Image: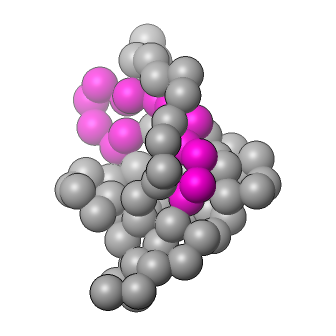
Amino acid sequence: MDRHYFNPTPDMIYWGKGGGSYICLEAEGHFRAKFQRVNKYKWTFVAHGCQMYDDGTIEWDGSTGGHYEE
């Protein structure tokens, strides 16, 4: 399945390739964005190298700043 780098859109919810949904809180450009896992724990992080597959699922090369929101 082909994939390409993309710039996520704020307030849009994406489905992760490995499962789970993520809302884009802030787009930082250069294929980087701040995401929050859509569940009760609200894991928040900055994803670097955001990529989207043909089926619309996403993944990223790495992440930094991961923490739980209160």
Image coordinates for residue 56, horizontal then vertical, percent: 40, 79
Instruction: Depth check: give the residue in front, 40 or 15.
Output: 15
Q: Residue 43: x percent and y percent?
A: 38, 28
> Looking at the image, can residue 11 be seen?
no
Judge by depth and name the residue closer to the eye, 58 or 15: 58
Looking at the image, residue 17 lies above or below residue 32: below
Dividing the picture into quadrants, the one containing residue 8 is bottom right
- Count of numbered labels shown in the rendering: 0
Asked if residue 20 shows in the view, the reply is yes
Q: Residue at x 33, y 59 (%)?
A: 16
On screen, 32 above or below 17?
above
Q: Position of residue 11 (x, y in %)?
A: 59, 55
**On the rendered image, what quadrant is the C terminus found in?**
top left
In which quadrant of the rendered image does the N terminus lie?
bottom left
Residue 21 figure quarter: bottom left
Residue 26 in magenta stretch: no
Specify whether residue 47 is painted magenta: yes
Query: Which residue is depicted at the point 46% across and 79% down?
Result: 3
Q: Is residue 46 left or right of residue 41?
A: right
Q: Does residue 18 sit above or below 40 in this rendering? A: below
Residue at the outermost top position: 70
Q: Which residues are magenta?
A: 37-50
Which residue is situated farthest in the left direction here? 19
The foreground one among 33 and 11 is 33
Q: Is 56 situated left or right of 34 in this image?
A: left
Q: Position of residue 33 (x, y in %)?
A: 64, 47
